[in-house]
Amino acid sequence: MAFSVTTWNINSVRLRLPLVQHLLETVQPDVLCLQETKCPNDAFPSAAFRKIGYEHMAIHGQKGYHGVAILSRLPLSDDQRLSYCGIADARHVSAVVEAPGERRIRLHNFYVPAGGDEPNRDINPKFGHKLDFIEEMRGLHAESELKDGISSILVGDLNIAPLETDVWSHKQLLKVVSHTPVETENLTGMQQGGAWVDLIRTHIPPEEKVFTWWSYRAKDWAAADRGRRLDHVWSSADLADGLSKIEVLREARGWERPSDHVPVTAHFDF
């Protein structure tokens, strides 16, 4: 039985509502996880999504910044919102989705802090916040609810490209926030310590370059192709064998008034 989850940093859900509607009508994922929605809960365009069949939602928003949301065609339950680093900003939401084959899956949707420009926490508090955020994420374990029959999927803009092939130039980005050794090592340690499987790299060999983000600063993003893989899809090990494919919708970066991130969809066959 087929099941699919898409993750997308939309960079303002209201500004790019037509793009989200287009994605839902064409790709038709069972679940869409959005980051950087940039609006409070009462301003979220829920009616527009319900109109096209996404009736179940878990939203955690705030005015002008951050914000995450889960939209689903399937029932959701037990929605939760976690705060990290003692800061009450909207960077996490989770819910249990009733997936095909009587599977119950806890979906975690994250927007990890970008970390500013200088990779030194002594002079850049934003970088320290990012490192502390990842450290606190170690408390999430992929198998924490398996005893209750609940598997796990973690998605989102984690703002770190961990592998050399996750960036356009490993050598040139070693001192650039998102690919510094301290970030990549911390994210990898958090992933492995929590028994999370990197589904993108399960489907796309680690030797192959794959990007999900291209800067707005490039005059011709496609020709320059200076991308990074900042968006991730992880799961508990019991779901990995059910993965049938991963789709990175590169063309979305060229849509009118696009986000600088593109949607990534994990397809399962349970």
Image (cartoon, rainbow, N blue to C red):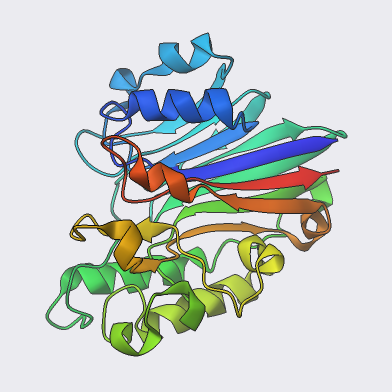
Q: Quadrant of residue 235?
A: bottom right
Of residue 191 and residue 85, the one placed in the foreground of this image is 191
Q: Quadrant of residue 75?
A: top right
Looking at the image, can residue 145 be seen?
no
Residue at the left extreme? Answer: 123
Looking at the image, can residue 28 be seen?
yes
- Where is residue 178 drawn, in percent x and y? 34, 72
Horizontally, residue 22 falls left or right of residue 153, namely left
Q: Quadrant of the C terminus?
A: top right
Horizontally, residue 45 falls left or right of residue 128, namely right
Tally of numbered tags:
0
Q: Is residue 72 above or below residue 7?
A: above
Q: Is residue 97 above or below residue 225?
A: above
Determine the residue positioned at 58% across, 61% down. Answer: 140
Horizontally, residue 120 falls left or right of residue 172, namely left
Determine the residue positioned at 70% across, 63% down. Answer: 203
Horizontally, residue 28 falls left or right of residue 151, namely left
Determine the residue positioned at 19% across, 67% down. Answer: 116
Residue at the front extreme? Answer: 223
Q: Is residue 243 above or below residue 66?
A: below
- Where is residue 148 drawn, in percent x and y? 80, 46
- Where is residue 47 drawn, in percent x and y? 43, 11
- Where is residue 113 drawn, in percent x and y? 31, 60
Q: Quadrant of the N terminus?
A: top right
Residue at the bottom extreme? Answer: 171
Of residue 251 and residue 5, the one placed in the foreground of this image is 251
